[in-house]
């Protein structure tokens, strides 16, 4: 399983619907002693939480070469709207990859992409959630709504989120899996295919939670020694059997447009895609947890000008149509816009 480079640079957040007080950012330097593995994490926490209320939690996994500091635009957006997010840093595939001899960076990337590290990342999410809920994050864990815990990630992190909600692979006649039943939904941004797995339907067949997929027509992963066309993002979505899924495809963009980088994918499109992605995640959660499609209907109308394909407004089977647009020079099947 391979993912793209995540390099972070903060961008401004749309203040609409934001709470009056700024959200809190808290870093944890946890150690999983059972695995002798550091699991740093950053918590974006809403400042204005009513006494006795419960806060939804998104556990977020970064892409290749990222860190807990990344995807801050999402963490800030969620926290400003009453949702906490815990951004987990994966020691075997984090920003330390870029430190050292540049001539050996390919070797470091290949080690980071090994399936043992892919599985370790999923255990990182489980450990971090354990710590969050069991007092390792102070009093915050007691305020989490345990019915509304979401796995999320970008690129390699999207694969990690998929493992956390039921993806599995067959090795030596046995299924290798890391599903955590505490995750009630999943958000996958730019999910790569599972490296070396030709039968994606089998890998993803056990995923039953509501899941959102976000990508773009130019969402191409290109790192030393690895290439994944944008059509791979659609293949992952199509291979998931449950009808409780949604897909949004932006027109143009890039793979790293979903990171904190400010100009990738075009300086005009970049902030729009970030704002739209952040808003879409909340519309998805409204639909998944409250069966409320109103926000998603409004989202489709607002962002239609930059969409190649819009998500449906119900977590039910959606028709697949041929798009007139092309991805990497060839037509691909996209979910039809409503």
Image: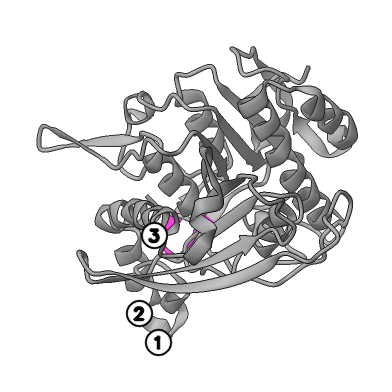
Say which residue label 2 marks: 104
Residue 120 in magenta stretch = no
Q: Which of 120 and 332 is in front in this view?
A: 120
Residue 224 in magenta stretch = yes
Q: Position of residue 212 (x, y in %)?
A: 59, 34
Q: Earlier in the sequence, mark 1 or mark 3?
A: 1
Tag shown at residue 146: none
Q: Quadrant of residue 323?
A: top right
Is the magenta region chiefly helix, strand or loop? strand
Q: Position of residue 338 (x, y in %)?
A: 78, 17
**Mark 2 → mark 3, Cα distance in angstroms:** 35 Å
Q: Nearer the viewer, residue 132 or 305?
A: 132
Tag shown at residue 131: 3
User: Which mark's residue is nearer the viewer, 2 or 1?
Assistant: 1
| Magenta region, residue range | 222-226
Quick one: SS at disc 2? helix
Q: Which of marks 2 and 3 is nearer the N terminus?
A: 2
- Against 98, residue 172 (above or below) is above
Query: Which residue is at a point 43% across and 53% down the rendered structure image?
Result: 133
User: Which mark's residue is nearer the viewer, 2 or 3?
Assistant: 3
Q: Residues within 10 Å of mark 3 (few under 14, many from 20)?
A: some
User: Which mark's residue is nearer the viewer, 1 or 3?
Assistant: 3
- Against 36, residue 16 (above or below) is above
Query: Which residue is at a point 45% across and 45% down the rendered structure image?
Result: 161
Tag shown at residue 100: 1
């Amino acid at each position: 399983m391979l993912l793209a480079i995540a390099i972070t640079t903060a961008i401004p957040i749309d203040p609409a619907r934001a709470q009056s007080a700024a959200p809190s950012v808290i870093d944890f330097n946890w150690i999983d002693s059972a695995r002798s593995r550091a699991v740093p994490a950053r918590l974006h926490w809403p400042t204005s939480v009513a006494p006795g209320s419960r806060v939804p939690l998104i556990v977020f996994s970064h892409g290749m070469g990222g860190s807990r500091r990344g995807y801050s635009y999402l963490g800030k957006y969620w926290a400003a709207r009453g949702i906490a997010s815990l951004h987990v840093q994966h020691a075997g595939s984090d920003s330390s990859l870029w430190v050292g001899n540049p001539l050996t960076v390919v070797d470091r990337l290949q080690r980071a992409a090994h399936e043992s590290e892919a599985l370790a990342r999923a255990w990182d999410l489980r450990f971090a959630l354990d710590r969050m809920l069991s007092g390792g994050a102070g009093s915050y864990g007691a305020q989490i709504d345990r019915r509304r815990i979401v796995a999320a990630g970008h690129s390699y992190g999207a694969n990690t989120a998929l493992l956390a909600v039921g993806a599995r692979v067959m090795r030596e006649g046995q299924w290798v899996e890391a599903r955590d039943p505490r995750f009630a939904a999943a958000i996958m941004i730019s999910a790569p295919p599972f490296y070396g797995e030709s039968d994606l339907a089998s890998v993803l067949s056990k995923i039953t939670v509501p899941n959102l997929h976000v990508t773009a027509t130019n969402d191409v992963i290109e790192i030393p020694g690895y290439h994944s066309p944008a059509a791979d993002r659609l293949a992952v979505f199509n291979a998931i059997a449950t009808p409780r899924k949604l897909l949004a495809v932006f027109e143009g963009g890039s793979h790293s447009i979903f990171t904190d980088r400010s100009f990738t994918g075009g300086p005009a499109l970049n902030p729009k895609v970030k704002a739209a992605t952040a808003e879409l995640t909340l519309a998805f959660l409204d639909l998944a947890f409250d069966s409320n499609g109103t926000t998603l209907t409004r989202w489709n109308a607002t962002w239609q000008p930059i969409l190649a394909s819009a998500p449906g407004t119900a977590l039910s089977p959606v028709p697949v149509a041929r798009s007139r647009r092309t991805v990497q020079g060839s037509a691909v099947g996209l979910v039809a816009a409503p």
